[in-house]
């Protein structure tokens, strides 16, 4: 596998095709095999192929068409039999139109195309991905994770995830390092980084509850926050239970039961 975005552009050619001894200052004695030679008879995965410079794209096209490479600093053509799989998060067709990606190379690699939607368009995958990353990275940090809280899943499913699965994985790793317990859950006060107003209101509510000094301060805080959320959702939706339930990510029945518990009036069930 070659991450074309991670390798410096002036080194990418030698990384792909190798080089001969003395090809440039600092070249290894005896030269070096490139990824195409190493993958002979197998498959080479080119990640972020859109980041390959235009001049190098022409050389890559010749390899794909003729099955021959030429090392940097060499004169001999070397026969290679490699299946190439390429991936990118860029819009290659737009890059072709802008002259940043060769059209002939695009049509050459666009044989079998698989479109993977961004994470925000497949939120149903988030629970399984979070549990997988929690197990995977929990072992690495010596932490046993037996489950993931529903609050965390709901929080993650509400986020836009511009960085897609990589961003989700890094967020899970961060939580593993900054929280404790066998069940992975959101950090206390995590909303502060998302919404300063919400954070301020929650802190104010927490201060009032703690000042009252009841033995069940935690449950009192949670109940008041939950009641405020339900009232806010119903207010935004004009009292429509179905719409408010969708906004909160809960069922209509759950919303009605909680509203009744907190004395919040809702529309007639027939509405």
Image (tube, helix red, strand yellow):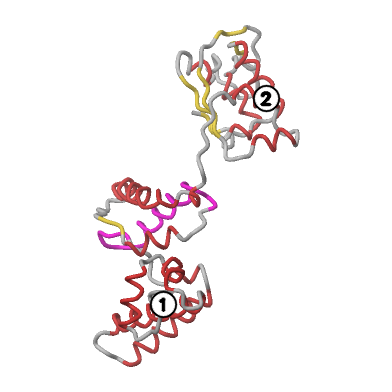
Element carrying mark 1: helix
Work out whether residue 107 or residue 63 is closer to the camera in this orientation and state it: 107
Q: Position of residue 75 (x, y in %)?
A: 66, 8
**Which residue is at the far front?**
270
Marker disc for residue 230: 1
46 is higher (above) or lower (below) than 260: above
85 is higher (above) or lower (below) than 20: below
Task: Kindly identify the residue that appears in the image at 33 percent across and 62 percent down.
Answer: 150
Element carrying mark 2: helix
Spatial separation of the CA atoms under disc 2 and disc 1: 57 Å
Q: Residues within 10 Å of mark 2 (few under 14, many from 20)?
A: few
Left or right of 58 on screen, residue 193:
left
Q: Is residue 78 magenta?
A: no
Q: Which corner quadrant holds the C terminus?
A: bottom left
Marker disc for residue 56: 2
Q: Which residues are magenta?
A: 162-184
Q: Is residue 183 magenta?
A: yes
Left or right of 171 on screen, residue 254:
left
């Amino acid at each position: 596998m070659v991450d074309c975005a991670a390798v410096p552009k002036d080194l990418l050619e030698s990384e792909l095709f190798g080089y001969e001894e003395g090809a440039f200052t600092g070249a290894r004695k005896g030269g070096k095999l490139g990824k195409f030679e190493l993958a002979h008879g197998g498959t080479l995965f080119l990640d972020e192929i859109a980041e390959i410079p235009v001049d190098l794209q022409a050389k890559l096209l010749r390899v794909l068409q003729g099955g021959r490479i030429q090392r940097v600093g060499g004169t001999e053509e070397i026969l290679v039999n490699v299946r190439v799989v390429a991936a990118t998060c860029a819009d290659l067709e737009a890059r072709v139109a802008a002259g940043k990606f060769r059209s002939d190379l695009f049509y050459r690699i666009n044989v079998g195309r698989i479109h993977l939607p961004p994470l925000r368009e497949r939120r149903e995958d988030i629970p399984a991905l979070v549990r997988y990353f929690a197990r995977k990275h929990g072992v690495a940090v010596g932490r046993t994770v037996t489950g993931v809280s529903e609050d965390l899943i709901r929080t993650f499913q509400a986020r836009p995830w511009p960085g897609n699965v990589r961003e989700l994985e890094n967020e899970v790793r961060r939580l593993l390092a900054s929280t404790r317990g066998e069940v992975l859950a959101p950090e206390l006060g995590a909303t502060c980084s998302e919404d300063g107003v919400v954070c301020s209101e929650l802190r104010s509510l927490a201060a009032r509850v703690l000042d009252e000094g009841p033995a069940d301060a935690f449950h009192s805080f949670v109940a008041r926050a939950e009641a405020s959320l339900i009232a806010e959702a119903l207010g935004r939706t004009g009292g429509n239970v179905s719409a408010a339930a969708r906004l909160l990510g809960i069922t209509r029945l759950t919303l009605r039961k909680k509203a009744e518990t907190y004395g919040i009036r809702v529309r007639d069930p027939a509405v």
